Image (cartoon, rainbow, N blue to C red):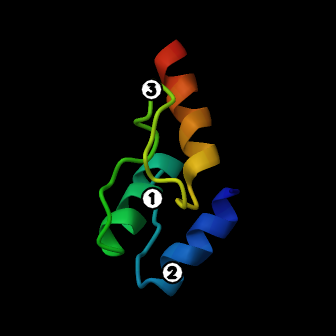
Amino acid sequence: MKMDEIRTLARRAGIKPGKLNKTQLVRRIQRHEGNFDCFATAFDGLCDQQACVWRKDCFSLAKQNRAA
């Protein structure tokens, strides 16, 4: 999901995006929704949250972070 879409979702939830990066903003949205703020932490490629809207981006960023 692109940052402008994530910022829009955040604003709809009453969250001010400010200068938060993608990971920080998605985690803030997750907490606001009452979910575990786990975005970009699936370093091993495993996650039991099959219906998560962030799943594809989560795996991608986790892989990038692990390589860094």
Tag of residue 43:
3
Left or right: where 17 falls relative to 4: left
Specify few, some or many for label 3: CA neighbours under 10 Å numbering under 14, 14-19, or 20 or more.
some
Asked if 40 appears above or below 28 in the picture, the reply is above
**Which circle's residue, 2 or 1, is located before the other in the chain?**
2
Left or right: where 24 falls relative to 36: right
47 or 29, which is in the foreground? 47
Asked if 47 appears above or below 34 in the picture, the reply is above
Q: Are marks 3 and 1 in contact (CB under 8 Å)?
A: no
Tag of residue 11:
2
Residue shown at the point (47%, 18%) measured from the top left: 66
Left or right: where 67 falls relative to 49: right
Question: Could you say which quadrant of the image residue 37 lies in?
Answer: bottom left
Residue 1 rendering spot, x and y as whole percentages: 68, 56
Tag of residue 25:
1
Distance from Cα at disc 3 to Cα at disc 1 = 19 Å
Quick check: can you spot residue 4? yes
Distance from Cα at disc 3 to Cα at disc 2 = 29 Å
Specify few, some or many for label 2: CA neighbours under 10 Å numbering under 14, 14-19, or 20 or more.
few
Residue shown at the point (29%, 72%) measured from the top left: 34
Which amino acid, by three-letter code, is at mark 2?
Arg
Residue 55 rendering spot, x and y as whole percentages: 57, 49
Residue 45 rendering spot, x and y as whole percentages: 51, 29
Q: Of circles 3 and 2, which is in front?
A: 3
Specify few, some or many for label 1: CA neighbours under 10 Å numbering under 14, 14-19, or 20 or more.
many
